[in-house]
Amino acid sequence: MDTLKVHKNVYEEMISWMKSNIPFEACGILVGKGNIVDEFIKMENVAKSETFFEMDLKELMKVLDYIDKENKDFIGVFHSHPVSNPYPSKTDLERNEIIDNLIFVISSLRKGTPEVKAYKISEKIVKEIEILII
C-alpha cells in the first residue's frame, strides 16, 4: 500500500480529536476496507502522557470485535505528537514490534496548523506513504 485514502469527515474527526486532547497525545483506530479509511474510532490515552499513548486493552478488544462483526479491516493506528515531529518515535517503533506492517498516522501541531503523515512500519523500517483525502 503506497496510498492511504481517508474520507474527509474522518480526517476532520481525527484533527478535532487531536486538538481536544492537548496537551496529551490523542489516539484512535482507523477502520475501513483495504486502503480506504471510512471510520475513526476514538480511544482514550489511558497514559495521559504528552510523549506516548496507551490504549485500554478491554476497549481495544471491543473495537476489534466490532471491526470483525462489521466485516471491516483494522487499517491502522492514529495518534498525535502535540509538539514534536509527526514521525514515529523510538517508543512507537518499540511498541510496533507486536504488530508488523502496521500503518501509523501521526499528526502534530508543532507549527500551529495540523501536519498529518502516514507511515507503514515493518521490522522497524519506516516508510512514508501518501495520504489522500477523499
Image (cartoon, helix red, strand yellow):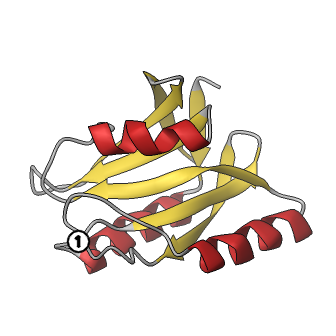
Task: Judge whether 39 appears above or below 121 on screen.
Answer: below
Task: Judge whether 128 appears above or below 94 on screen.
Answer: above
Instruction: Locate residue 118, reporting x and y percent.
Output: 44, 38
Helix, strand or loop under label 1: loop
What residue is rendered at 16% in x and 73% in y? 23
**Which quarter of the picture shows residue 29?**
bottom right
Instruction: Locate residue 51, reporting x and y percent.
Output: 21, 58
What residue is rendered at 26% in x and 72% in y? 19
Instruction: Locate residue 113, reporting x and y percent.
Output: 17, 55
Task: From the viewer's perspective, tell me whether residue 120 is left or right of residue 91.
Answer: right
Quarter of the picture containing the N terminus is top right
Query: What crowding class fits label 1: few (fewer than 14 Cα within 10 Å), some (14-19), or many (20 or more)?
Result: many
Task: From the viewer's perspective, tell me whether residue 59 is left or right of residue 74.
Answer: left
The amino acid beneath tag 1 is: Phe
Disc count in the image?
1
What residue is rendered at 69% in x and 39% in y? 35
What residue is rendered at 64% in x and 79% in y? 58
Q: What residue did someone put label 1 on?
A: 24
Using the rendered image of the protein, determine whether residue 8 is visible from the camera's viewpoint.
yes
Q: Nearer the viewer, residue 134 or 72?
A: 72
**Which quarter of the picture shows residue 127?**
top left
Instruction: Locate residue 126, reporting x and y percent.
Output: 43, 24
Q: Nearer the viewer, residue 3 or 97?
A: 97
Using the rendered image of the protein, determine whether residue 89 is visible from the camera's viewpoint.
no
